Amino acid sequence: MGIRLPAISQGKQILKQSLHSNSSEIGIPKGCLAVYVRKTQKKRSVVPISYLRRPSFQDLLRKAEEEFGFGHPMEGLPIPCREDIFIKLTSHSDGS
């Protein structure tokens, strides 16, 4: 049983809306979402939506909300993280 945070729920809703609206038009497979990893330059990555359950990814979502908010004009979610750290976080299972 986990604690539900309103910001994470809001972020998931926005992601779901963007997935249904234009994901096939911009080359995102069903069941995935686009994120833009950026500290200095942005690099697009496509990740499975199952990552939304991972505690490490939820931490990144909180940081993204603090830094960018959820009303951004991009086709994917900006993640405030260096690419090497993002790869490390997404390549390890959090036991979820």
Image (cartoon, helix red, strand yellow):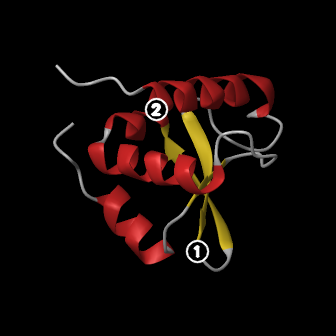
Name the residue at 26% across, 25% down.
Answer: 3
Q: Which residue is mark 2?
A: 8
Farthest residue, direction bottom: 40
Specify few, some or many for label 1: CA neighbours under 10 Å numbering under 14, 14-19, or 20 or more: few
Name the residue at 39% across, 41% down.
Answer: 51
| Figure check: 21 above or below 73 | above
User: Where is residue 89, by image quadrant?
Assistant: bottom left
Name the residue at 59% across, 40% down.
Answer: 33
Under tag 2, what secondary structure? helix
Name the residue at 51% across, 47% down.
Answer: 47
User: Where is residue 20, by image quadrant?
Assistant: top right
Left or right, 7 with reference to 30:
left
Coordinates of residue 91 in the picture (x, y in percent): 32, 60
Specify few, some or many for label 2: CA neighbours under 10 Å numbering under 14, 14-19, or 20 or more: some
Q: Which residue is mark 1?
A: 39
Coordinates of residue 66 in the picture (x, y in percent): 54, 51
Q: Quadrant of the C terminus?
A: top left
**Comes first in the chain, label 1 or label 2:** 2
What amino acid type should be assigned to the residue bearing mark 2?
Answer: Ile
Front in this rendered view, residue 83 or 81: 81
| Figure check: 67 above or below 50 | below
What amino acid type should be assigned to the residue bearing mark 1?
Answer: Lys
Coordinates of residue 27 in the picture (x, y in percent): 74, 44
| Figure check: 51 above or below 40 | above
